[in-house]
Image (cartoon, helix red, strand yellow):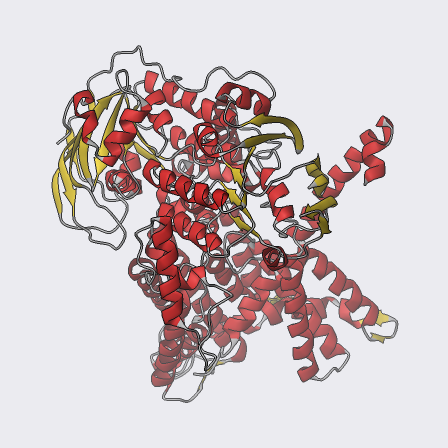
């Protein structure tokens, strides 16, 4: 791609970018949210037209008018947003739009299932191809999109944050697949915010900032500091260890005793005997592979999801509680930053203002009447405290970058003045700068006595931010690790249940 | 575009305010789309209006109030429908509930000899109850609003027919048995020197209350939040079930009010009254710029949408255009209004 420029309205998303992928190469594309990575790749995959500049494949200039066009030329893209049809099965999604036909012209379901199963198998994914996609967890859905793109046998495969919802174990599987593709001579563009992945998987790394190429590195020798500096445009100091860990945790805020819930929904891993405690001012991490039950534990504490038979006790501030729903949870001082902000966190078309005060309009209303002034001052205080970058509180929240969107969700939760803050993957799809700020805010909340329970798939985040980490597997607490004493590798090993870490476990959580 | 980028600095600085103004202007047009449409249609009506002795017939105050009166029933329904559509729902039962309320009013007044106040209260309560039951079915059992209110539409129509024995009940006024109190006939009258029709006043009052309600109450914030993202709203502590039940309750209540107005205007209650009105109400809401997917729109837009249809019908009638042609034109306006929404500046990248 030579000198590619693309503007939306008056905003220039990509400005004269040169970018190339060689056969048998993994080329990482880095940059903060809004740097133009996705736009550049959408130009390449034919989704975005009306650009200036040139694209050449094997030396021949091409100009795609649609994704189908690009696919015929051997270019496929795995999207950050999961573009699957929820009600269709895994196999139907993989073959969507190019279903194999029988001699009678009907869809050859058996062949579809067989080939999907084979592809899943090659990728090392244990999912029944007949299951509807809507029953799968986010991470499993992400694996399906990857399998779908792989089945296209593309010459150039673009992966836009393919691992954002994957557990460490599945990431390793994916990397093995990528290595295979590279050996087979495919060119791969790899977009990710996770610096440690780049060094493992990529050969070259190009950094975009404000739509321009600002740096190119040898991915293997590049350091995280170099890359972040190029992305942000200035040295980044505070990455992890932002939480104030010197503070001795206070008395117990939350105690969970042998919690087990049986709701038996497909694709869910409900708590099956979890015990843990969170002190006032303590940040406790929840680790575990995809499907280990992290999300379900947070949901149970927040009272969402179907009701079911219940065992064990939840004690908050010395009183036993049984969360029945978000309203009650909020009254008790529990707040939740949900897993997927676009699906469960924000009304994207609505203003930053409306999204920020959503949880507290009742509280700032008098006799059911809301004062615009009070709404605005509450929202302004929140966005300023969290450093949300915006032009106006009236802007639709969907027009903000992922990091700023997440700050709006976090700000809404902090406005409820929670005693216990639950967070589910709060930094997924969030750029380095915003990540650091979110960590700072968590540390700040903790230093004010808020107890924090943080579920994350990023070992670096858990080790860097939390006082302690509970490792979940199969809905049970397996290990409790002191982050002062363990490394990210230990955490990973514990998640996968490898015995080698037994010595590092400071307390069995069971 | 390249000239702007590589041009001298002054060009660039001059360019910025222009794009900025354009960016603020467009959303404003789209926000008040139905109002602009109304102004356009109104202007066109003035131009194309037949004249008599140099007077523009369309602008005759009696005619203008007739326009408002003619849309008052649909308008009242549309206000309730706006709330329902804002939470991402739909209410197909309002036309039938109007019929039930109309029959109920006539029957209670004429056959049962009730006074006006009890009749109004009973009928409103029936409408409210009907809406609340539908709301409960939708909110607590999670059945789609389309299905529940489709069933409600059949049930209300059936009740209206059973109640009336299939016959329209004529309302005659007087003090004798089988006669309705004269007060009720006010609904067909005009006030302020015989100028302003009472139904128009009722519609304006309902719309005004709804506009204020949707601006200043925490309830309104909940309504918009549910329409914007129901899951996010629930997780944020919005009482989703309660708000849904209240919204469908209000919609049923307003349908009953429209039914009372209907009976008062026509001096009878017919079991088939209001057939198809639900679609007219939805049309007014859509022309008013409220998104059928919820979360976006306003009662003011709906009022403008209803007026737009009313003005259009009126001018076509004044020009003696065949009523079947009128249907074609209204249909095109709906498509145009909905189509324009597609060009709304993308707020989400």
For the residue pair A297 and A155, the one nearer the viewer reads as A155
The reply to whether residue A131 is in sight is yes
Percent x, y of residue A363: 38, 34
Percent x, y of residue A158: 54, 45
Residue name at image x 29 percent, y 30 percent: A492
B117 vs A213, left or right, is left
For the residue pair B56 and A196, the one nearer the viewer reads as A196
Percent x, y of residue A291: 28, 44
Percent x, y of residue A381: 49, 25
The reply to whether residue B185 is in sight is no
Point out the image quarter for the N terminus of chain B: top right
A416 vs B23, left or right, is left
Q: Is residue A270 above or below residue A416?
A: below
For the residue pair B12 and B109, the one nearer the viewer reads as B12
Q: How many discs mark residues in the rendered view?
A: 0
Q: Is residue B189 above or below residue B23?
A: below
Residue name at image x 27 percent, y 52 percent: A267
Q: Is residue B247 above or below residue A450?
A: below
A86 vs B3, left or right, is left
For the residue pair B61 and B68, the one nearer the viewer reads as B68
Point out the image quarter for the C terminus of chain B: top right
Residue name at image x 50 percent, y 80 percent: B267
A460 vs A183, left or right, is left
């Amino acid at each position: 791609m030579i000198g590619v420029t693309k503007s939306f309205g008056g905003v220039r998303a990509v400005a004269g970018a040169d970018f190339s992928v060689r056969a048998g190469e993994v080329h990482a594309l880095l940059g903060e949210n809004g740097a133009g990575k996705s736009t550049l790749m959408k130009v390449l995959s034919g989704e975005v037209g009306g650009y200036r500049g040139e694209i050449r494949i094997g030396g021949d200039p091409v100009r795609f008018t649609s994704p189908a066009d690009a696919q015929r030329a051997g270019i496929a893209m795995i999207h950050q947003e999961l573009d699957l049809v929820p009600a269709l099965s895994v196999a139907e999604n993989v073959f969507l739009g190019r279903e194999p036909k029988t001699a009678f012209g009907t869809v050859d379901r058996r062949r579809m299932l067989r080939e999907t199963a084979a592809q899943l198998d090659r990728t090392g994914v244990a999912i029944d191809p007949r299951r509807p996609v809507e029953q799968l967890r986010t991470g499993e859905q992400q694996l399906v999109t990857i399998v779908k793109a792989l089945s296209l046998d593309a010459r150039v495969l673009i992966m836009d944050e393919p691992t954002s919802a994957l557990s460490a174990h599945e990431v390793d599987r994916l990397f093995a697949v990528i290595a295979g593709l590279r050996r087979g001579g495919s060119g791969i563009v790899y977009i990710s915010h996770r610096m440690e992945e780049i060094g493992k998987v990529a050969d070259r790394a190009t950094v975009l900032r404000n739509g321009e190429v600002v740096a190119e590195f040898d991915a293997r020798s590049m350091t995280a500091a170099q890359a972040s500096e190029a992305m942000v445009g200035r040295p980044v100091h505070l990455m992890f260890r932002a939480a104030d860990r010197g503070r001795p945790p206070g008395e117990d805020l939350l105690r969970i005793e042998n919690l087990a819930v049986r709701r038996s929904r497909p694709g869910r891993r409900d708590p099956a005997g979890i015990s843990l405690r969170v002190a006032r001012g303590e940040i406790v991490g929840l680790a575990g592979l995809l499907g280990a039950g992290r999300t379900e534990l947070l949901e149970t504490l927040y009272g969402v999801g179907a009701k079911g038979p219940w065992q064990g006790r939840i004690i908050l501030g010395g009183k036993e509680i049984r969360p029945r729903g978000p309203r009650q949870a909020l009254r008790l001082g529990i707040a939740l930053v949900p897993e997927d902000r676009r699906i469960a966190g924000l009304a994207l078309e609505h203003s930053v203002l409306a999204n920020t005060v959503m949880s507290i309009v009742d509280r700032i209303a008098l006799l059911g009447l809301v004062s615009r002034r009070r709404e605005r001052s509450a929202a302004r205080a929140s966005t300023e405290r969290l450093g949300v970058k915006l032009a106006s509180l009236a802007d639709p929240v969907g027009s903000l970058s992922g990091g700023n969107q997440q700050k709006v969700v976090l700000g809404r939760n902090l406005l409820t003045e929670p005693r216990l803050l639950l967070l589910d993957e709060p930094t997924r799809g969030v750029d380095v700068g915003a990540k650091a700020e979110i960590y700072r805010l968590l540390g700040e909340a903790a230093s004010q006595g808020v107890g924090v329970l943080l579920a994350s798939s990023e070992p670096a985040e858990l080790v860097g931010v939390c006082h302690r980490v509970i490792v979940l597997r199969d809905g049970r607490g397996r290990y409790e690790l002191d982050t002062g004493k363990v490394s990210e590798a230990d955490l990973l090993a514990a998640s996968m249940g490898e015995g080698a870490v037994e010595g590092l476990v400071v307390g069995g959580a069971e | 575009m390249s000239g702007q980028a590589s041009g001298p600095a002054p060009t660039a600085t001059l360019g910025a305010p222009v794009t900025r103004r354009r960016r603020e202007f467009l959303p404003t047009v789209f926000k008040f789309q139905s109002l602009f449409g109304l102004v356009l249609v109104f202007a066109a009506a003035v131009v194309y209006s037949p004249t008599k002795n140099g007077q523009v017939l369309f602008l005759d105050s009696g005619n203008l109030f007739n326009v408002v009166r003619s849309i008052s029933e649909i308008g009242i329904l549309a206000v309730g429908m706006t709330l329902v559509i804002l939470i991402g729902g739909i209410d197909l039962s309002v036309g039938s509930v109007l019929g039930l309320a109309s029959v109920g009013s006539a029957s209670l007044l004429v056959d049962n000899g009730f006074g006006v106040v009890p009749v109004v209260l009973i009928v409103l309560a029936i409408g409210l109850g009907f809406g609340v039951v539908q709301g409960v079915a939708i909110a607590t059992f999670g059945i789609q609003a389309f299905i529940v209110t489709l069933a409600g539409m059949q049930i209300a129509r059936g009740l209206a027919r059973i109640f009336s024995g299939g016959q329209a009940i004529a309302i005659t006024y007087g003090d004798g048995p089988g006669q309705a109190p004269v007060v009720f006939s006010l609904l067909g009258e005009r006030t302020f020197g015989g100028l302003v029709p009472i139904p128009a006043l009722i519609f304006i009052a309902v719309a005004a209350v709804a506009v204020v309600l949707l601006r200043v109450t925490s309830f309104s914030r909940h309504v918009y939040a549910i329409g914007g993202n129901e899951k996010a709203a629930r997780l944020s502590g919005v009482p989703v079930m309660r708000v849904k039940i209240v919204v469908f309750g209000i919609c049923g209540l307003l349908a009953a009010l429209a039914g009372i107005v209907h009976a008062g205007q026509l001096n009878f209650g017919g079991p088939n009254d209001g057939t198809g009105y639900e679609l007219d109400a939805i049309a007014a809401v859509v022309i008013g710029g409220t998104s059928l997917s919820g979360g976006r729109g306003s009662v003011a837009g709906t009022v403008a949408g209803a007026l737009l249809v009313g003005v259009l019908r009126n001018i076509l009638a004044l020009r003696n255009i065949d009523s079947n042609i009128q249907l074609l034109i209204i249909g095109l306006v709906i498509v145009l209004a909905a189509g324009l929404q597609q060009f709304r500046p993308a707020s989400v990248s």
